[in-house]
Amino acid sequence: MIHEVDEALRRLLGESGLQASGVEVVLDAPTRDWAARRTGPTVCAFLYDIREAAARRGRGAGEVYDADGHVVARRTPPRWFALTYLVTAWASRPQDEHRLLSQVLTTLVTGEVLPARLLTGTLAELGLTVGLETTVTGADGPSASDVWSALGGELKASLGVRVTAPLAGVSRAAGPPVTEGLVVRSAARQQDGEPVQGRRLRYEEVGDPGPDGFAGPRARPSAPARRRRRGDRQP
């Protein structure tokens, strides 16, 4: 799921016109060494914090159907996680960096979700809304200054972007659909040591047996024709 969010966010930033103007969109950690090797204008979205949105955790299990409407698996509810990115712009002049950062900000604040057309893999299969929040503060996670300190770089203007996405639950295959009826054999108790003949019930259908259950009256199939044996008299 994490790499799918990475790809969706990278594509969203690319659609803002950055790639068309020659600006590279990367997901690297903006360390001092990385900044020294940079050769052109770049927008960097660095993932630095992942934590579960525990308030959205569900219970139970859902059913997965095939094209014919049969249950083929049961899946536990998805777990939701908040992924926080540090988005920065890199250019030769501060004015150019601020222009790039403004262009990124305009793109990110146009909606509160990642567009469905950008989702791939399990995110697209689940069909759930992936939240997008911009200018996130570090109240419940590392602050921007802490991140820059850990990266060994100098503090610069940046945007905090949080994506809340589902992690698909675990699927367990279900048994094949019922296509034949049931045969129920009852075991009767013995009386005075003598066995009592049990009952054999057959239900040919696969739907609801009705209010009488499997013991209700059923149409009996006609008996097969008796096979003629050698020596039987002709009528």
Image: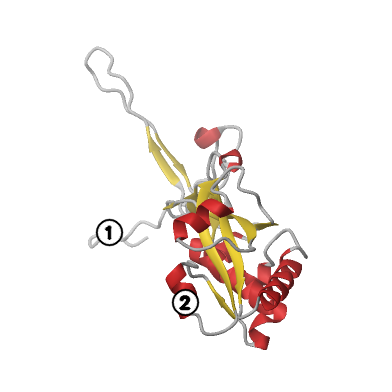
- Please name the amino acid that badge 1 sits on: Asp
Point out which mark residue 36 bears. Answer: 2
Looking at the rendered structure, the kind of residue marked 2 is Ala
Q: Is residue 126 left or right of residue 183?
A: right
Q: Position of residue 193 (x, y in %)?
A: 21, 15
Sequence-wise, the earlier of marks 2 and 1 is: 2
Location of the C terminus by quadrant is bottom left
Examine the rendered structure and indicate whether residue 109 appears above or below residue 35: above
Q: Residues within 10 Å of mark 2 (few under 14, many from 20)?
A: few
Decide if residue 71 is in sight here.
no
- Measure how far apart labels 2 and 1 are at the Cα level: 105 Å
Per the rendering, the mark at residue 115 is: none
Residue occupying image coordinates x 32% and y 60%: 227
Q: Tell me the residue at 58%/42% (across/down).
A: 140
Residue 232: x, y in percent?
27, 59
Nearest to the observer: residue 25 or residue 210? 25
Element type at mark 1:
loop
Circle 1 Cα neighbour tier, 10 Å, few/some/many (<14 / 14–19 / ≥20): few
Q: Nearer the viewer, residue 120 or 90?
A: 90
| Residue of label 1 | 232
Find numbered disc 2 in the image and state the secondary structure of the residue it sits on: helix
